[in-house]
Structure formats: structure tokens, C-alpha cells
């Protein structure tokens, strides 16, 4: 009887949390497992730009790796000029994205967020109206779109084609243009960003609602 | 190999931040494009500000050299307009639907998402298409 009393349950919880926080390593991990606020994440991402310059005069940007991966795998009989260069000079860049993937491994392996994404109320209502479930605990992407059904695979592949084609046509993506390019005051990056934002708005307002089932 | 080690470390930090900040989340991207939360804009603006300020500091310190001793210089983008706008539009259309730009594609693969591998496969084909038809496109 006492067990189901809400107050005693709450007290039990407080005691459990208090006894946990006595172990410093565990409480650090618990602290870091929460979602990181923008004012921590943004500056950390911004620091990538000077860090890459400092390490070896490299321009921070991700999408060039898609080109390098094409250059590595292009069969000699196809021989597109755009992919004929010494990709070994860009090892550093490939090492960086291998690191990025490892960062994802660390994030879910060591610091998983036990809670669902804390979206704004408006966003939750919109997603429900589109016919999606609310974000499940620990999920970054909707299972409705990323589970490997034939229809999803076709859609994700097509979306990927647009991302790959567009980033190469614009010579960069969010990291190279929005962050590196704007921080170094390059007008070309502003053009790219205008295009990116217009495309993103069109897709999110007019295409995504069509996906709803 | 050890000269690549700093890139690996910075890459790991980048992937970790993309996942923990939820920038690699489709939900957050939809919320951003509908102006329903400041979260993603906060990340973007504070990242740009941090990068801009720290580059200025880096260029003003006495010994502005890289780890291996070269002079630091900011690489500049090739001149152009139409290719940046149209390319951005096409990329944005893809980003808005699948909610992943290139950095988060790699970070999400690390979290074990098979869907993200499909996106990467598509992105490689898209990149190849651009390379193959580059000369026929306005630049």
C-alpha cells in the first residue's frame, strides 16, 4: 500500500538519484547524457574552423568527402575527369569523417539520452498532424521514414542524391558554407546559404506533408 | 599516421556534438524550417560567431603558424553566383525532406542507422552525377 503512494515513490526516486550522484564518474556521464544546449554545441562546432586551420591550414567542410569517396571507387573504365585527382592528399579529410562517425558511436554507446527529443509544442503538433508518431525515446530520426521498407529506401536514396548533387554543385554544405564561409565573410557562401534555406523551406513546408500517410 | 591523429580527435568531437545537440535529428530540422524553436538557429549563429572571432584571434597572435609550421591562410571560395544558388537549392530540397546534411549523415551512421547508409549511398550517386554532367551545367 505504502509503495504506491505517490509521495513515497517520489522520495524513493530522490534517494536513488542522491545515492547515484555520490559516484563522481557516473554523475558526469549522467550530466553529459542530457541533450547539449545550443550555447554549448554551437561554440564547439564553431571551434572546428580555427582548429582545422591550426592543425594544417584546412578549410572545415564535410561534403568534399563525398567527392573523395567517388574518386576512390571510380572504376578506370568510367573515368570522369572530376574524380581524377590524387585523393591520397585528402586522407586528413577522410580521417575527419571517420572520426565523425566514431563520435556518433561514442554518443550512443557512452552518453545515450534516455528521454525523447524535447521538441517545442508547435513542432509536436505539426508532426502529429503530418501523421507521424511523437519522437520515440532515444530516436533522432522518425522510424516512419528511416525504417528500411522499400518505399523508405527509395525516398532516402533520392534525398541523398539531391544532397550529394547539390552540395557539389554549390561546392559545399552547411559546414563549409554556413559556418566556415560566413565566418570568413565570403559572399559565395551567402549565395549558397540563400539557396539552401529556400530549398529547405520548400521541402519542409510542401514536400514533407505529402509524405504523411 | 600520427599526423592524422588530430583530425581524428576533432572529427570525433564533431560527431559527438552533432548527435548530442540533436542537429543530426530530422525532427529538429523540421522544427527549424517552421521557425518553431530557437535551438537550431542558436547552434548556427553561435557557431558562426565563435568561428569568426576565433579566426581573428588566430590571425592576430604572434606566432600564427599551423602545427607543422606553415603560415596560416584562410582558403577562399571560387568566384561564382548561379552555381552556388542552384546548388544550394537542390541541396536544401534534399536536406528539408530527409533532415540530414553531410556531417550528420556520417554521425548518424555511427549511431547505427541503416537509413543513413542509404542516404550516403544516394549522396555518392548524386555527387557522381554532378561530376559526370558538370560541363553541361551553368556555373
Image: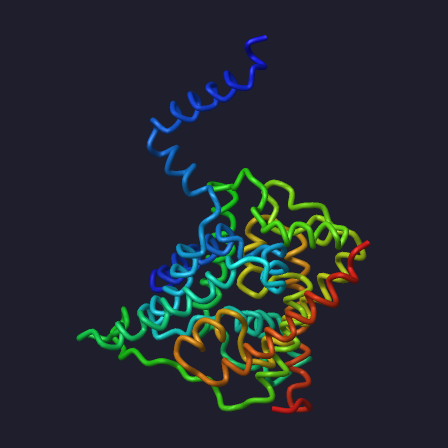
- Dividing the picture into quadrants, the one containing residue B9 is bottom left
- Dividing the picture into quadrants, the one containing residue B4 is bottom left
Viewer-nearest residue: A96 or A91: A96
Q: Identify the residue shown where x is 68% and y is 65%.
A: A204
Residue A192, x across and y down, in percent: 55, 80
Q: Is residue A97 left or right of residue A79?
A: left
Vertical placement of residue A59 versus A136, above or below: below
Vertical placement of residue B91 versus A146, above or below: below
Q: Is residue A55 left or right of residue B31?
A: left
Viewer-nearest residue: B62 or B66: B62
The N terminus of chain A: image quadrant: top right
Residue A196, x across and y down, in percent: 59, 75
Q: Identify the residue shown where x is 60% and y is 83%.
A: B85
- Dividing the picture into quadrants, the one containing residue A115 is top right
Q: Identify the residue shown where x is 55% and y is 57%.
A: B37
The C terminus of chain A: image quadrant: bottom right
Vertical placement of residue A121 versus A199, above or below: above
- Single out the residue that lies furthest toward the left: B62
Amino acid at each position: 500500500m505504502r509503495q504506491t503512494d505517490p509521495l513515497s515513490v517520489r522520495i524513493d526516486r530522490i534517494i536513488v538519484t542522491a545515492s547515484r550522484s555520490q559516484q563522481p564518474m557516473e554523475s558526469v556521464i549522467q550530466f553529459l547524457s542530457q541533450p547539449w544546449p545550443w550555447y554549448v554545441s554551437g561554440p564547439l562546432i564553431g571551434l572546428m574552423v580555427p582548429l582545422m586551420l591550426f592543425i594544417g591550414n584546412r578549410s572545415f567542410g564535410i561534403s568534399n568527402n563525398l567527392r573523395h569517396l567517388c574518386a576512390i571507387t571510380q572504376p578506370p573504365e568510367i573515368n570522369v575527369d572530376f574524380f581524377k585527382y590524387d585523393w591520397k592528399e585528402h586522407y586528413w579529410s577522410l580521417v575527419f569523417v571517420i572520426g565523425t562517425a566514431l563520435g556518433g558511436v561514442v554518443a550512443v554507446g557512452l552518453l545515450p539520452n534516455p528521454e525523447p527529443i524535447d521538441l517545442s509544442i508547435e513542432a509536436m503538433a505539426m508532426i502529429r498532424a503530418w501523421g507521424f508518431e511523437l519522437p520515440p525515446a532515444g530516436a533522432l530520426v522518425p522510424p516512419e521514414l528511416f525504417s528500411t521498407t522499400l518505399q523508405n529506401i527509395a525516398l532516402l536514396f533520392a534525398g541523398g542524391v539531391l544532397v550529394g548533387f547539390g552540395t557539389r554543385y554549390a561546392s559545399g554544405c552547411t559546414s563549409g558554407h554556413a559556418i566556415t564561409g560566413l565566418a570568413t565573410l565570403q559572399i559565395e557562401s551567402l549565395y549558397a546559404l540563400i539557396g539552401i534555406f529556400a530549398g529547405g523551406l520548400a521541402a519542409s513546408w510542401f514536400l514533407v506533408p505529402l509524405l504523411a500517410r | 599516421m600520427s599526423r592524422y591523429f588530430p583530425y581524428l580527435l576533432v572529427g570525433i568531437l564533431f560527431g559527438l556534438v552533432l548527435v548530442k545537440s540533436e542537429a543530426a535529428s530530422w525532427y529538429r530540422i523540421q522544427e527549424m524550417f517552421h521557425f518553431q524553436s530557437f535551438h537550431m538557429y542558436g547552434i548556427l549563429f553561435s557557431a558562426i560567431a565563435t568561428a569568426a572571432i576565433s579566426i581573428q584571434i588566430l590571425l592576430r597572435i604572434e606566432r600564427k603558424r599551423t602545427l607543422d609550421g606553415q603560415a596560416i591562410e584562410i582558403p577562399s571560395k571560387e568566384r561564382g553566383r548561379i552555381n552556388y544558388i542552384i546548388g544550394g537549392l537542390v541541396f536544401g530540397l534534399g536536406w528539408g525532406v530527409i533532415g540530414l546534411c553531410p556531417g550528420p549523415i556520417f554521425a548518424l551512421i555511427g549511431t547505427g542507422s541503416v537509413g543513413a547508409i542509404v542516404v550516403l549511398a544516394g549522396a555518392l550517386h548524386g555527387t557522381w552525377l554532378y561530376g559526370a554532367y558538370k560541363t553541361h551545367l551553368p556555373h
